[in-house]
Image (tube, rainbow, N blue to C red):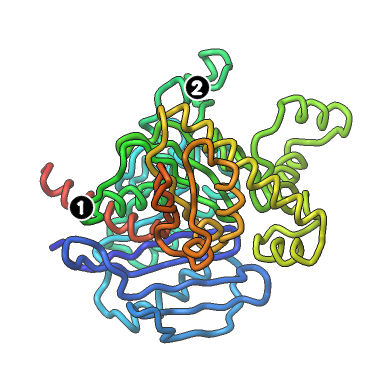
Amino acid sequence: MFDGSILVINTGSSSLKFGLYVGQEGDDEPVLDGSADGIASGNGKLELRDSQGRVVRSEALSFASQGDALDHASQWIKEFSPSEPIAVGHRVVHGGPRLLTHQLITPEVITGLKACLHLAPLHIPLALELIERAERAYPKTPQFACFDTAFHRTMPEATARFALPRELFDEGIRRYGFHGLSYESIVHQLGHQAGAGIPSRTVIAHLGNGASLAAVKDGRSMDTTMGLTPAGGIPMATRCGDLDPGVFLYLQRMKHMSPDSLERLLNHDSGLTALSGGMGDMRDLEVAADGGNPEAHLAIEVFSTAIRKVIAAYAAVLGGIDMLVFSGGIGEHSARIRGDVCKGLGFLGISIDDASNKTHQSAISTKDSTIRVCIAPSQEDRQIARHCREMMRGSVAGE
């Protein structure tokens, strides 16, 4: 009864990813996957690919919202896969202080998500909309929420706690961490490598438009850069990362900025975009820097330096590092960033091979490097499918 397909839904701020996964040889494999880009831009596209990555359907379509895109995508999926999925899995960025584990979506879960809208105002409303739209498309199919924060619930209080009064911690003001599904997928990949397994002390750098790092001990999260919200940690494409609290006081007192204005500044008008004068995409920044643009060069330097500082700090958290993993769009595809980060970490024993790095090999460290450095793809959607199938098996076993 658990061999059917699982529909996975993963949304971004202006995009939607979806995939249909089936159980094969002990793991979940995609039979269809698709994406909708340019949502609410008037210049969108919906694309569907088969298990070999070949485009089977592509149309220029404009969608007002991710929900509208999902409605259309559901019709395409039904054309190519007539049998309905046995489950729908959603990536949910934040579950607040009470929704800390992956779970079946119930009315109580919906209520819990609505109660923590303030913690991720850009993400949770989208998740709620897609849960509702999926229920309309598949009214008899169970839906599951897979939380990006769940992986980090193993962090000790010493790393999860801010230096604030206890009552605030008890109210849920703490370090939650994000990109957990990506980290889980990498731990899964490393744990299933033939004859290898995940090293005891691993630092994973998930680098994309949103970026964070995690210190992982024996497969469990010990520390991570993002905190209460996905705006903290290292600088990102449009997000500021960590700031001196005095900056907020200055902006409120001297610039008279409202909470909404602050949110706009910190989430959309900061990070690499602010440093470079308008460029948030690393590919554009690298081209501009190579062309002599000093602001683009500065943005890359700030980004790489912040990552390097965290890796060095996590060596102290873990008592050393056995493996460093790069993932995410930038982590997987930017040889420049990987090189810039690693060149300042020779004192830890990190040494990378330039040729392997430039050609994006899975292993990029030299033979004499005391720390293994590798590249691993983020498999958030596949990890969601794995969790959904496990939860369905668990619900039957527990009956």
x and y percentages locating residue 249 in the rendered image: 78, 26
Q: Tags 2 and 1 in contact by the CB under 8 Å rule?
A: no
Which residue is labeled 1 in the image? 195
- Is residue 378 in sight in this rendering? no
Q: Name which residue lies at 81% across and 62% down.
A: 292
The part of the image, by quadrant, that contains residue 371 is: top left
Question: Of the residues tagged 2 and 1, which is closer to the observer?
Answer: 1
Q: Name which residue lies at 30% across and 47% down.
A: 104
Amino acid carrying label 1: it is: Gly
x and y percentages locating residue 197 in the rendered image: 25, 47
x and y percentages locating residue 89 in the rendered image: 35, 57
Quadrant where the C terminus sits is top left
Task: Please name whichever residue, 101 or 398, is drawn nearer the observer in this view of the structure.
Answer: 101
x and y percentages locating residue 184 in the rendered image: 35, 47
Most extreme residue toward the right is 254
Which residue is labeled 2 in the image? 161
Q: Name which residue lies at 29% across and 67% down.
A: 21
Looking at the rendered structure, the secondary structure element under dot 1 is: loop
